Image (spheres, rainbow, N blue to C red):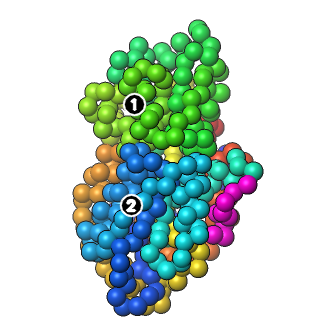
């Protein structure tokens, strides 16, 4: 599979390294910064955003307020970012669905992912975790596949929204396994998890931040991960590839964006403040532990506003069903 680079990767860095300083007056920020999260509260994207905001605030003293604007696979929230004033007080959590996948699914987009955003940084890449209820009869992916083959169309696979990486992972998995399943769409992770716990749906390829706390509590059972190698946080859980589907990999990426024409970070003292906050955060371990527990891979702040040639979105704009932000880890593929 041909993979295009969206943003050059550097060594892992903690989350608070990711927000750049903007070129405003010396007292910037003079008020709270709004971070728009284009998915409901309680899901993985929301959890990443809140952890990021907390870490940046602890390192810099800035106040970052989370605003959830869900709908249309993340399009509603990212539209709000695109149309906001480019004054450094609105940023958004972009990710694979709303920046790279949706343009191939929706006939009309409310924004142009190539022109309407200034890129700040890649935040994290995450493999997904395939989970069932702890009360489910399926104790492995192989058992679920066998049941689906025995009674086609009876096994249900949920996802948190059309066009999400979890949606594509479920579709690709069913195709690779040669099974017919019932795909059930939801509007957020919280609703899906509730129905899995209640036995209304069987399987979810979920964001680790949304499903792993319930796994640790004994309520959900992880039966596979979509990375090519087992996750350190779940060493006993096999990969989908180990189950017999060589090369299967699905991962989501998240990254901060600002409205296009947000002033360049290289013009003034706020850049130095941002760098100072990054250095302070880099020494802290709490955020890294949280991300490691969720199997997230932190990436360095290698993109500044505006986007450099190394970070042009044209490399990620989809020409097919999915694209990747970084070097291919953040992709949906079954090779």
**Residue at 49% over, 64% down:** 92
**Residue at 52% over, 40% down:** 187
Q: Residue 318: percent from the left, percent from the top? A: 69, 54
As helix, strand or loop, the secondary structure at mark 2 comes to strand
Is disc 2 in contact with disc 1, using a CB cutoff of under 8 Å?
no
- As drawn, the label of residue 3 is none
- Determine whether 207 is above or below 64 in the image: above
Residue 137 drawn in magenta: no
Our reading of the magenta stretch's main secondary structure is loop
Residue 178 visible to an observer of this rendering: yes
- Determine whether 64 is above or below 317 in the image: below
Residue density around tag 1, few if under 14, some if 14–19, many if 20 or more, within 10 Å:
few
- Residue interval drawn in magenta: 108-116
Quarter of the image where the C terminus is located: top right
Q: Name the residue under label 1.
A: 194
Q: Mark 2 points at which residue?
A: 66
Residue density around tag 2, few if under 14, some if 14–19, many if 20 or more, within 10 Å:
some
Q: Which of marks 2 and 1 is nearer the N terminus?
A: 2
Residue 10 visible to an observer of this rendering: no
- Determine whether 320 is above or below 29 in the image: above
**Residue at 64% over, 20% down:** 180
Tell me the distance, in whole angstroms, between the alpha carbons under discs 2 and 1: 23 Å
Image position of 48 (left or right of 184): left
Residue at the extreme top: 150
39 and 234: which is toward the camera: 39
Image position of 26 (left or right of 200): left
Image position of 228 (left or right of 314): left
**Residue at 41% over, 45% down:** 43
- Determine whether 133 is above or below 63 in the image: above
């Amino acid at each position: 599979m041909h993979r295009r680079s969206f943003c050059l990767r550097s060594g892992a860095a903690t989350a608070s390294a990711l927000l750049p300083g903007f070129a405003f007056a010396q007292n910037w920020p003079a008020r709270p910064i709004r971070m728009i999260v284009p998915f409901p509260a309680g899901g993985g994207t929301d959890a990443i955003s809140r952890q990021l905001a907390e870490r940046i605030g602890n390192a810099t003293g800035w106040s970052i307020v989370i605003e959830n604007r869900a709908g249309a696979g993340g399009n509603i929230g990212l539209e709000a970012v695109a149309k906001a004033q480019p004054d450094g007080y609105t940023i958004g959590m972009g990710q694979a669905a709303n920046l790279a996948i949706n343009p191939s699914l929706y006939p009309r987009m409310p924004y142009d992912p190539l022109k309407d955003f200034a890129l700040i940084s890649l935040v994290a890449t995450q493999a997904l975790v395939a989970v069932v209820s702890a009360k489910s009869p399926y104790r492995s992916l192989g058992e679920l596949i066998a049941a689906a083959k025995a009674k086609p169309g009876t096994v249900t696979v949920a996802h948190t929204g059309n066009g999400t990486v979890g949606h594509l992972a479920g579709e690709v998995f069913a195709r690779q396994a040669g099974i017919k399943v019932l795909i059930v769409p939801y509007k957020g992770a919280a609703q899906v998890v509730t129905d899995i716990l209640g036995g209304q749906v069987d399987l979810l390829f979920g964001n680790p931040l949304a499903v792993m706390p319930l796994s640790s509590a004994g309520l959900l059972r992880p039966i596979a991960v979509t990375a090519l190698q087992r996750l350190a946080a779940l060493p006993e859980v096999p990969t989908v590839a180990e189950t017999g589907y060589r090369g299967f990999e699905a991962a989501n990426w998240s990254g901060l964006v600002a409205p296009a024409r947000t002033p360049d970070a290289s013009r003034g003292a706020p850049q130095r403040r941002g760098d100072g906050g990054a250095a302070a955060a880099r020494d802290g371990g709490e955020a890294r532990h949280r991300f490691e527990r969720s199997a997230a891979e932190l990436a360095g702040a290698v993109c500044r506003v505006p986007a450099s040639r190394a970070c042009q979105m044209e490399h990620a704009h989809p020409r097919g069903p999915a694209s990747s932000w970084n070097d291919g880890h953040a992709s949906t593929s079954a090779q």
